[in-house]
Image (spheres, rainbow, N blue to C red):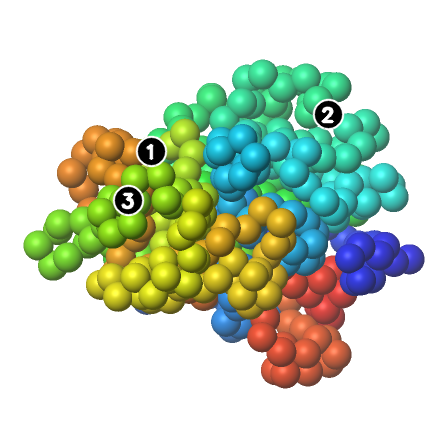
Amino acid sequence: MKIELNGVNYRIPQSPVAVICVDGGDPEYIEAARKAGAIPAIARFMESGFTGAAHCVIPSFTNPNNLSIATGAPPAVHGVSGNFYLDRHTGEAVPMTGPAMMRSRTIFDVFSRAGVETAVITAKDKLRRQLGKGMDMGNGNICFSSQCADRCTLLENGIQDALGWVGRPLPGMYSDALSLFVLDAGIRFLEAGSRPRLAYLSLTDYVQHRYPPDHPVALEFFQSIDRRCAKLDRLGATVALVADHGMKDKCAADGAYNIIYLQDLLDRRFGTGKTRVICPITDAFVGHHGALGGFVRVYCFEDLNVFDAIRFIESIDGVESVLAGADAASRFGLPLDVEGDAVVIASGAFCIGMTPGDHDLEGLHGERLRSHGGISEREVPFILNRPLNREYQARAGSEQLMNYHIFEYALNGVR
């Protein structure tokens, strides 16, 4: 039996499947941990299963990519291309993090309603609300976040005492424990089932925002992930690892932050009120990135021609590319109706903000700034613990793998 969603036919699993989204899991972290001998199970997956070089969707942010993974489609299909866009009628920045913004069903919705016991477990609750849209919260299906694991209800989450069920205390938001709780919950879910089960386990990138790939804390974190992947493998699951985006250092050699305060520069060039910069990475967790990323939207007002703005922005040091909104939507598969007049993408060592007053950097505690959003963070790992069948071996060799192919490969492509 197969289930169709967004033009893809997915097989109903006959054995457990666990897809792990390692938030911020740049391939450099996998390589550093493998070199250090910290991830023996994942290294074995890469050798005897399958590993490929995949791309994430642009902007390389968490929500657009998790929803692409969940729908098997780019943002133009599911409608979410960041955390914010500008409502031109009201002049207000509108959150895109609620379920109402979604324009597609998810794999979890259709599988849970087809009788496959399904779990969606996330680190942050804002993502859980989108990924769980439409899911059947009965019949053994669950959807909750480690952030709010102490507030679960049967009606909303399909589980009541999540802390007692997992056997771990509520983790802190700025900790590796937030991600490890997700993985332990996924293990518990697969252990408890008698029927084939499908689990999506989405982590948080706190460690990667704070530490480079070869730092002892990063290596220890990936070692902890590896131990849990080994447990999932021993449970007989198809284990798939992918990332929503990569992660890069955004500092000069002396540690100074490479930040382009674009709204300041536009105001000086064209005058106040002629443009509006929206940073779609913005969320409540300023300790991760200070609302600074590699992709921003620019809106033009009054008589300002967007191409005049584009020509000016192209001259700014640290800008990799500037595209008109329609061109960006076409190139990156984004929903045009919520796109800006222009899209600005930073080069690998830079990030883009609005004005200094719009960004709270105190949460970084003077440490190096590491972030994402641009093309420089689009490469992500794509790892399966089992080898591919002939059909999908051929596909992997002939197409650009995208992170949102992971469920198709895990369900249809393994031997």
Write the residue at 11% across / 59% down: 253
Looking at the image, the residue that sits furthest to the front is 303
Q: Is residue 272 visible?
A: yes
Q: Position of residue 346 (x, y in %)?
A: 33, 59
Between circles 3 and 1, the one closer to the viewer is: 3
The local secondary structure at tag 1 comes to: helix
Q: Residues within 10 Å of mark 3 (few under 14, many from 20)?
A: few
The local secondary structure at tag 2 comes to: loop
Q: Name the side, left or right, on which 120 lies relative to 381.
A: right
Q: Is residue 205 visible?
A: no
The amino acid marked with disc number 1 is Val
Q: Residues within 10 Å of mark 2 (few under 14, many from 20)?
A: many
**Upstream in sequence: badge 3 or badge 2:** 2
The correct choice, above or below, for 120 with respect to 47 in the image is: above
Which circle marks residue 286 in the picture?
A: 1
Q: Position of residue 391 (x, y in %)?
A: 75, 79
* Front residue of this view, candidates 187 and 339: 339
The amino acid marked with disc number 3 is Gly
The residue that label 3 is drawn on is 271
Write the residue at 47% across / 22% down: 170
Q: Position of residue 251 (x, y in %)?
A: 19, 54
**Upstream in sequence: badge 3 or badge 1:** 3
Which circle marks residue 158 in the picture?
A: 2
The correct choice, above or below, for 65 with respect to 395 in the image is: above
Write the residue at 81% across / 45% down: 110
